[in-house]
Amino acid sequence: MARKRVASGSSSRSVDEERLRRELVAELDKVRADLRESVAMFRMRLEGRITQVQEAVSSPDLMSEDLDKEARVEALTAMLEAIRSLRVKPEKGRRRDLKRFEALVDALAEQAASWE
C-alpha cells in the first residue's frame, strides 16, 4: 500500500498566502483613502483659484479709469473663449480632463493676477 506524501510547509504556505491577502486588502483600503483625500484637495485648490479669479474679475477696482478699457475687454473676451473651448467628459473621469481643468484655471488665474 502506497502512502501519500504531504508536502512539508504546504499549510504554512496557505497561512502565509492568507496573511498576505489580508495585508494587501488593508493596504488597498489605505490607497483608496489617500486617493479620496488627494482628489478632494486637488478640487479644493482649483475651486479656490476659480474663486480668486471670480473676485478679481468682479472687483470694482477693475472698472477704474486707470486701467485700459480696451485691454480689459480683450482679456475678458479671451478668458471667456478659453472657458467655452474647454472640452471635457466628466462622466469618464479621465486624468486628461483634470489636467485640462488645471491648465484652464492656471491660465485664468495668471490673467487675473496681472490686473492686481
Image: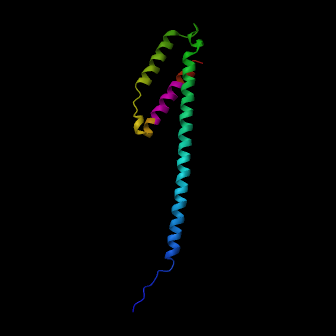
Whole-percent x, y for residue 108 in the image: 51, 24
In the image, residue 71 above or below residue 95: above
Q: Residue at x 54, y 50 (%)?
A: 31
Residue 33 in view, yes or no: yes
Whole-percent x, y for residue 22 in the image: 53, 61
- Viewer-nearest residue: 81 or 32: 32
In the image, residue 30 above or below residue 52: below
- Viewer-nearest residue: 79 or 25: 25
Q: Say whether residue 116 is magenta.
A: no
Q: Say whether residue 102 is magenta.
A: yes
In the image, residue 35 above or below residue 19: above
Farthest residue toward the top? 65
What is the span of residues highlighted in magenta in the rendered image? 98-109
Farthest residue toward the front? 1
In this rendering, the count of numbered labels is 0
Residue 114 in view, yes or no: no
Whole-percent x, y for residue 20 in the image: 53, 63
Colour setting = rainbow
| Quadrant holding the N terminus | bottom left
Q: Residue at x 53, y 10 (%)?
A: 68
- Viewer-nearest residue: 106 or 86: 86
| Quadrant holding the C terminus | top right
Q: Residue at x 47, y 28 (%)?
A: 104
Q: Residue at x 45, y 33 (%)?
A: 100
In the image, residue 6 above or below residue 114: below
Whole-percent x, y for residue 63 in the image: 56, 10
Q: Quadrant of residue 77?
A: top left
Magenta segment, principal secondary structure? helix
